[in-house]
Amino acid sequence: MVTLDRTGLLPQCASCIRRVTRLSLNARPPLQQVRSKSKAARDAERNVVVKLRLDVPRFGRAGSYIPIAPGTMRNRWFPSRIADYVTPLQLKQLEAEGVDTSRDFTFGVRVPLEETEEQDLLQMPKQHYVRPIEIDMLSPTRSMELINTFIPPTLSFFRKPIEHTQSDAKQRQGASSAADVLTAAAMASQPEPTANSIYGSVSAADVVTTIRSALAHNDEAARVLLAESDVRFISGHVDGDSSRVKQLGDFRVEIQMPGAEAPLTRNIRVRAKENS
């Protein structure tokens, strides 16, 4: 029986070694060729869809949806209020409606082939977004109800009365005839003050300020918008001027906001201010 040694099966010459090596290489399965994505496809996956707020040359008109690089949107367009982000829910709705979200490269191109530089648009002063103040306005009827609830029937004010003395007039009489004539003319041109006259006056503005101070202690009542034109005196006021009184006593004011059905009346009590 012949015993075969393993070394006897190996090729013994250079030609045999090359043939065996070539057969081994050809026996391997061919490598699968993988084609990489194009640059346009990769950019389409990385871009985000935004909604333009302004006309941007080479991109599109205001209100259109276009893709843009996330870095450009984050660092330049959104801070400059050029475009707004589109949420995933809005993007799905746009796709369902078949809205075109491609970029318009021909928008804003001048003839002959002159384009408006994007840098000019970005160099414009930034328009900072200011959120509008939302105020829940009270109706005139509700405002009058709050005034009627929180304002007492009588509002008191204190003013310094005018003291009437005749000593100065008597001392000046007889100094000279010309001085007496001038004094008499000046006194005749001025209205004669009454016994209850005060320095200054109590005006509709004073009444409004007092009402606002009383309403400020309630959150809902503090939103009442009361103007000076909504308050007028119906007794004791100066002739032809219903916005103020200039004497001590008790008076009445009428509060009527535009749109309210009926006015409110309150008593105004003007008392003498004691000297400190």
Image (tube, rainbow, N blue to C red):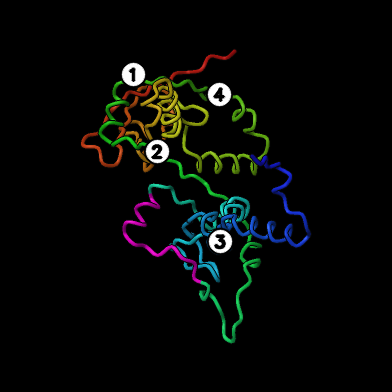
Decide whether residue 103 is among the magenta residues.
yes
Q: Nearer the viewer, residue 251 or 257?
A: 257
- As drawn, the label of residue 165 is 4
Residue at the spot of label 1: 152
Q: Earlier in the sequence, mark 1 or mark 3?
A: 3
* Element assignment for label 4: loop
Q: Which residues are magenta?
A: 90-104
Measure the C-alpha gap from mark 2 to mark 3: 60 Å
In this view, 189 is above or below 153: below
* Element assignment for label 1: loop
Measure the C-alpha gap from mark 2 to mark 1: 27 Å
- As drawn, the label of residue 135 is 2
Residue at the spot of label 3: 35
Mark in the foreground, 3 or 4:
3
Say what amino acid the circle numbered 2 marks.
Answer: Ile
Say what amino acid the circle numbered 3 marks.
Answer: Arg
Q: Earlier in the sequence, mark 2 or mark 1?
A: 2
* Residue 220 locus on image (x, y percent): 36, 26
Q: Earlier in the sequence, mark 4 or mark 1?
A: 1
Say what amino acid the circle numbered 1 marks.
Answer: Pro
